Amino acid sequence: MSFFSFGQSAEIDVVLNDAETRKKVEHKTEDGKKDKYFLFYDGETVSGKVNVTLKNPGKRLEHHGIKIEFVGQIELYYDRGNHHEFVSLVKDLARPGEITQSQTYDFEFTHVEKPYESYTGQNVKLRYFLRATVVRRLNDISKEMDIVVHTLSTYPELNSSIKMEVGIEDCLHIEFEYNKSKYHLKDVIVGKIYFLLVRIKIKHMEIDIIKRETTGTGPSVYHENDTIAKYEIMDGAPVRGESIPIRLFLAGYDLTPTMRDINKKFSVRYYLNLVLIDEEERRYFKQQEITLWRKGDVVRKSMSHQAAIASQRFEGSAASETPPGLKGGRRETNIRTKNRV
């Protein structure tokens, strides 16, 4: 239940019908903190009650209608004046008139399409909310109640491993292999690094998980790279023929599903960045995109039938791309990839 106060005239109380049983999840806010919100899935019905309580019973409250809206919108932080709505539903609860005592209004948005996952990033926010409004001549009484939406997926049919030979001619030749290219958010990345030729004094090796948030289009494109995790593979000099195993658990990190070209406004992609550092502090790196998805093949008993249907969908199965290495840092070298996949 979410309780709001509006001046001296009335208070609005928005109550979901299944508030006592619906799951709540933590979701990051703009200031970096985490709050709990009711969790919904694509296709689920959103229903409840709007209670309008007069602070002075018996005193008339004139209005030009009472309504509730269900809104899904994208806000770009560099363009805060424009909110891009991709879902906008309205239910009229009362015609223009007056209220002389507290009233309760039922509402229901049936099988609501919620195509995208809720997301709060560096430059963009995608949110869903209910907005109850008492329309008045001078100043409306209005407040918003946020909810969180998760998109569910089933196990991808095609999930090939990633295998590459990379190196610097006559100096370094390694082969790395990851067990697959698509991982759910609680998955484990398993792989191996093989050293086929080592003529550089390597002292340190790590794998980073990098989130790349892209917003805007054309000349107004912004890229934000955020290192989510650093996993040390090796500390010390490797020798030719050595094999180093990799086992990286994703459950402990703050990850979202891969999001590609969401409403033509933004994308969120993830990369595994293999980094080698030699004794002269030179950095050699190779980057590979992976796809992350939210596991939905095990449907909880508390999940509605609509959410079970939504869990059968899988989005983001586009083929992985191998972008150029990230820029930044001192004396970095993008390791050349040989033609073997």
Image (spheres, rainbow, N blue to C red):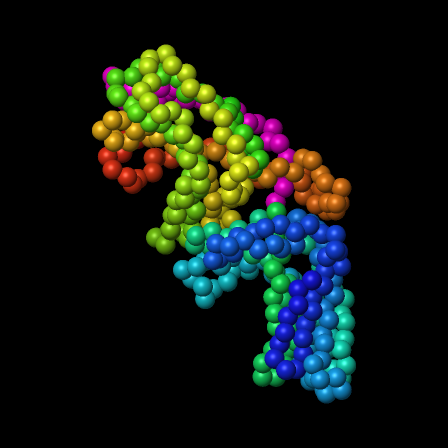
Residue drawn at the location 38% of the way across and 24% of the way down: 234
Residue drawn at the location 72% of the way across and 76% of the way down: 53
Quick one: quadrant of the C terminus? top left
Q: In this view, does 131 lie above or below 218?
A: below
Horizontal and vertical percent position of residue 108: 74, 61
Horizontal and vertical percent position of residue 203: 30, 25
Q: Which residue lies furthest to the bottom in this view?
A: 59
**In the picture provided, is 68 more to the left or to the right than 250?**
right
Residue drawn at the location 69% of the way across and 69% of the way down: 13
Q: Is residue 157 magenta?
A: yes
Horizontal and vertical percent position of residue 275: 35, 30
Along the viewing direction, whichever of 253 and 131 lies nearer the viewer: 253
Q: Can residue 233 be seen in this view?
A: yes
Q: Is residue 341 visible?
A: no
Q: Is residue 177 above or below residue 118?
A: above
Horizontal and vertical percent position of residue 46: 71, 57
**Which stretch is magenta?**
151-177
Residue drawn at the location 72% of the way across and 54% of the way down: 45
Quick one: quadrant of the N terminus? bottom right
Along the viewing direction, whichever of 35 and 339 lies nearer the viewer: 35
Q: Is residue 231 magenta?
A: no
